[in-house]
Amino acid sequence: MAIAAIGDVSWDYQNLIPPLASGCRGTPDARLVRSERSSPVRYGRSASFSTSMGGSGTGPFLTLPSIVSYAGVKLTVRMALSHQTGLPNWRDAKGLAFDHDPGTTTGYSGEGYQYAARYAERRTGQSFETLAGRWLFAPARMRASGYVSAQGATMPIAVPYDDVGKPLPVARVTRYNAADLAHATARDYARFLVDARNDRGLISPVSAERSKSQADLTPEICVGTKATTCPPWTGFGLGWQLLGFPDGKTMLHTGKDAGAFTFAAIDRVSGDGIVILTNSDNGWRIRSPTPASPGRCALSERAICASRPAGEKAWV
């Protein structure tokens, strides 16, 4: 876990059980292969970069030949970042096809982020890993983070565990996935979180758009008993879920894969934030950070409650 504040990243406490690997104690610099929470890492500065190259930051369009029955449908980066492409989360054995017409509905899509990555590569003529290193990892000083080239090279990757404590195999990643499987430390991701809150490297139009709800999630999420823990509004910004509270706005993202659960949130007004990386199927049970920081506890508590899926049992 890492606690973030304006211009500051601190390590509060560690409680990784079982250990990351044989003889490897949990530390703020232990790497975790992140689950689908990886997506916001890619696309803050990339949209600004696209604009600086003469684009709009949200267009123009890129044809994807891999889409079944493409029929000239136009996608934009804005649609991808706000999960309005109409594409499924991941393609099935039949191939990639639209579930809905682009721009007509909201649905989380890893394929949409892959589209945005390919757009960046096509527009710049550079690989996505090169772009990420230049525009994100280097400026944010995320020296222990990356996709495939440095994975496990300088320090061990956290071993994932199932819900009964059995270690799970970790397949080697040989190609980047723009919505999944990047690796980082809690400290590195907290640095990124602070930069994201401070709009570092963003031109003002992109910053404003990222802080604005592009797709309203309130009717979908805030239903039944969940309504009692929901903020007044929630929606997708560009690359982040946004939680609108009376006293401010929180940027949030979670992710879950086999043997991993991740959570990151930061308050746009105060700059207080938290990063929680867990290497267990029980990671979603994480509740609140150390009571030594009551203000930050309040941030994580309300963000965690607001992000919990409807109908899910109370956390322990």
Image (cartoon, rainbow, N blue to C red):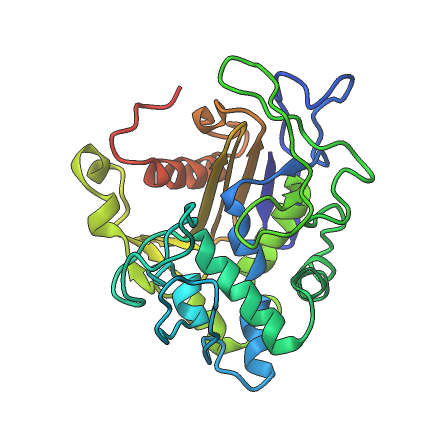
Query: Which residue of the protein is positioned furthest toward the bottom in this rendering?
Result: 54
Q: Residue at x 58, y 51 (%)?
A: 177
Displayed quadrant of residue 157: top right
Displayed quadrant of residue 127: bottom right
The answer to whether residue 102 is left or right of residue 281 is left
Q: Is residue 2 above or below residue 129?
A: above
Q: Residue at x 43, y 41 (%)?
A: 299
Q: Position of residue 68 (x, y in %)?
A: 39, 62
Displayed quadrant of residue 222: top left
Q: Position of residue 286 (x, y in %)?
A: 47, 27
Q: Is residue 269 visible?
A: no
Q: Is residue 241 visible?
A: yes
149 or 221, which is in the foreground?
149
The number of numbered badges drawn on the structure is: 0
Q: Position of residue 148 (x, y in %)?
A: 71, 48
Q: Quadrant of the N terminus?
A: top right
Q: Residue at x 65, y 43 (%)?
A: 183
Q: Quadrant of the C terminus?
A: top left
Q: Is residue 59 above or below residue 45?
A: below
Query: Which residue of the protein is positioned furthest toward the right in this rendering?
Result: 154
Q: Position of residue 134 (x, y in %)?
A: 72, 66
151 or 100, which is in the foreground?
100
